Amino acid sequence: MTIRFFTLIAAFAALVTVPYWMPGIYYVNVSSQILFYAIFALGLNVLVGYAGLVSLGHAGLFGVTAYATGYMLQLGFGHPAAILIALVISLIAMAIFAALSLRSTGIGFIMITLALGEILWGLAYRWISLTGGDNGLSLKTRPEPFGYSLSDVNTFYYATLVVFLLSLAAMAVFVRSPLGAALMGTRDQPRRMNALGYHVWAIRFYACLFSGLLTAVSAILFVYYTQFISPQTLALTSSAEVLLMVISGGPGTLLGPIVGATLVVAVKTVVSGFIERWNFLLGAIFVAIVILMPEGLVPGTVRLWRLAWRKRAPGTTPVPGGAEAKP
Amino acid sequence: MNALTVTGLCKSFGGLHVTTDVNLNVEPGERRLIIGPNGAGKTTLFNLITGELTPDSGSIQLFGRDITRVASRRRAHLGMARTYQIITLFARDTILHNVTLALLGLSPARWNPLIDLRRQGHFVEHAQAALERVGLGHIANRPLAQTSYGERRRVEIAMALTQNPKVLLLDEPFAGLSIDERRDVQQLLLDIPRDVTIVMIEHNMDVALEFAERITLLHFGEVIVEGNRAEVVADSRTREVYLGH
């Protein structure tokens, strides 16, 4: 418990001091990217990890928010209004998305979300009057909340950090709550949950909205970071990438998606500067994770840590058959 | 007024008639046993009564209220609880959490995304009390994955009891239990107060016969014999299709 506490304090201190110890502006920017992709992964994890519903269309929702923000700014709205309208549009989009895809679970759910994501991608590509088609939309400025201009790299990082910590706190509260427990129940035994008096569909629907909200928040940070949005962002590969963040880090855990986002973004941005075939490297890492820690990096590390601890600790004999053996 | 009334209930899967014109009248506080050979439609009848399946025709009444079209989750709120023949529990969680989920299912708090469930003292206390009642209080915090089959059967019953049902449907509560475990569960069922009406499917005749007041024999989806213990056991049709001697 204390080890965990100190690790969290150390991690928090490291995050707060990023602009002071990172070797340059470039790396501070990478840190911002890691944080908003981590929010995206947290959002997808609500469905993949806690609801047992794998979505391959979240990049489409991510894109809806990004385009909505960009388009509202083009229409002449201020930043707060644009963000607010984008959030509302995103939640409506997510509600429609959920109403269509929650007719099914398992493979059916994956296929419907995949199809919906592709439809949104197609719209971004073809609805040129609204989205600018292949040229995308550009954002001219970043907001200046309370007089701090987010055009400054460090300020943008801190704004992202604040939103990230709030998102993480929201997740932590949610998974401990009765609704969170109910959601995990519908993941493990939907039939039993129904018989116990739970409205399984409605619980999943609310989970979709929460997931959509986190996705929208990360998309707003993304679109202000790049100040540009194009159909590429909505492509299936983007959905798959976030899904890989969740799966590699550990679905159904709080920290897993964050570790996964760090891994993917770091390899994509930093390592790709040194290794031309970074895709190959990322693939190799995923294969290694699937073979060595199929439950994800965070639960896998915890398992190995406990195993090592048990072997070292005096007085306790290792249980034959490994950690999973029953006492 | 009957606790549970089933009238003219029919259900087919394609050409297979699994429930054919079934009528049941279970009085409040009654202990009813449903027997029948494999494939007689006993579990299907339970699934129809709890609403997991929709009947093709017929009606179901709970204390005079027609619930034929009521969603199955609502029936839990109206006082109906069930256990499963194939154990259906939350294997990743502790025994206590399993029972807490049963309690939470009937509480408005189940929609709350903001409070910490483990800090809700009354849920924990009630769940703990339900586990004491079935003799599992001492291992309440054990992960379900580390419990025996007999303990899981009792968790199933604890989850049903903790919802304070008016009508309790037990689907083979003795299946797969050792003689000792059977005795424990039998005592547990005998201790359930009379304001709970119990309908039970069971194959194990020595424990079930002792428990039941009235018995319904199903065969190919139809009620063949119904009556009190002695009548049903003495009936020649029971011997023919079920007891086999």
Image (cartoon, rainbow, N blue to C red):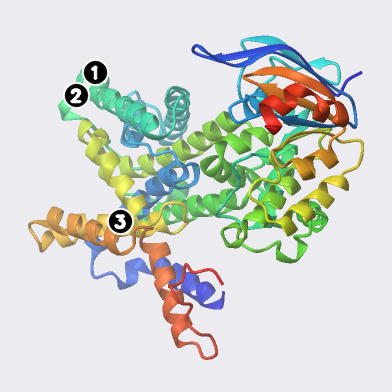
Question: Same chain, marks 3 and 2?
Answer: yes
Of A64 and B198, the residue lying toward us: B198
Q: x, y (%) of residue A120? A: 30, 25
Residue A257, disc: none
What secondary structure is marked by label 3? Answer: helix
Name which quarter of the figure residue A235 lies in.
top left
Residue B241 drawn above or below residue A300: above
Please, what is the three-letter code of the amino acid marked with disc 1? Trp
Q: Answer few, some or many: residues within 10 Å of disc 1's Cα (few below 14, many 20 plus, some between 14 and 19).
A: few
Q: x, y (%) of residue B129? A: 82, 55
Q: Which of pointers 3 and 2 lies earlier in the amino acid sequence?
A: 2
Q: A212 left or right of A202? A: left
Q: Which residue is mark 1?
A: A127
Please, what is the three-letter code of the amino acid marked with disc 2? Gly
Q: Which residue is mark 3?
A: A153
Q: B101 left or right of A324? A: right
Q: Residue at x 56, y 77 (%)?
A: A2
Distance of label 3 from label 1 (alpha carbons):
33 Å
Residues at circles 2 and 1 in contact by the CB criterion of under 8 Å: yes
Q: Which of pointers 2 and 1 lies earlier in the amino acid sequence?
A: 1
Of B149 and B237, the residue lying toward us: B237
What secondary structure is marked by label 1? Answer: loop
Q: Answer few, some or many: residues within 10 Å of disc 2's Cα (few below 14, many 20 plus, some between 14 and 19).
A: some
Residues at circles 3 and 2 in contact by the CB criterion of under 8 Å: no
Is residue A153 visible in the rendered image? The answer is: yes
Q: Which residue is mark 2?
A: A133
